[in-house]
Image (tube, rainbow, N blue to C red):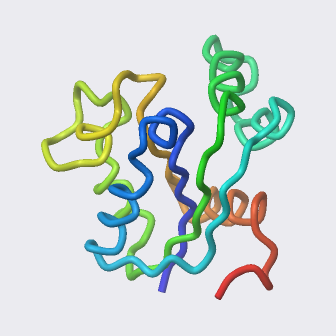
Amino acid sequence: MERTLAIIKPDAFAAGHAGGILARIYEEGFRVIGMKKLALSEKQAAGFYYVHEGKPFFDDLKGFMSSGPCVVMVLEADGAIRKWRDLMGATNPADAAAGTLRKEFGTSLGRNAVHGSDAPETAAFEVGYFFAGLDLL
């Protein structure tokens, strides 16, 4: 079984979509083995998204991710990374396929409802950023 990090971002949380997103996660056969509701500080958001430091959108990303509560989760499934990315859809909701979370719940490129790890190495860092081993069931 593979693990990936998933985040319900502040825009989707504020709009009341966390329940709908969680329902889809379970419907698609993921196991949620860790989950926390957090309010990230700008420093925590910067640490999590450090790979984007220096890019033009970095400050907006930090500000957005620290603008309100989010839900961070560790999902487990066969091929969890690809499976979650497929369920999320394209980064820009305008380009996302019908039936994907970003198409349904995202409103713009910068407010696209959910985050997911893009590779096993990224997933290992991201899961470890928010969860200790004993947090995962």
Q: What residue lies at 51% left-to-right and 49% top-to-bottom?
A: 8
Left or right of residue 109: residue 93: left
Left or right of residue 44: residue 33: left
Q: What residue lies at 38% left-to-right and 61% top-to-bottom?
A: 84
Q: What residue lies at 42% left-to-right and 71% top-to-bottom?
A: 80
In the depicted view, which residue is nearer to us: 16 or 95?
16
How many marks do you count on the picture? Answer: 0
Can you give x and y, in whole percent of width and height, for residue 35 in the image?
62, 68
Q: Is residue 14 above or below residue 135?
A: above
Q: Is residue 80 above or below residue 86?
A: below
Q: What residue lies at 29% left-to-right and 56% top-to-bottom?
A: 87
Q: In the current view of this chain or complex, which residue is farthest to the top?
A: 56
Left or right of residue 43: residue 94: left
Can you give x and y, in whole percent of width and height, for residue 106 in the image?
35, 33
Left or right of residue 117: residue 50: right
Can you give x and y, in whole percent of width and height, for residue 90 in the image?
31, 38
Q: Is residue 74 above or below residue 15?
A: below
Q: In the current view of this chain or complex, which residue is farthest to the left?
A: 98
In the depicted view, which residue is nearer to us: 83 or 110?
110
User: Dividing the picture into quarters, in which one does residue 82 lie?
Assistant: bottom left
Can you give x and y, in whole percent of width and height, for residue 63 in the image?
70, 22
User: Dividing the picture into quarters, in which one does residue 21 lie?
Assistant: bottom left
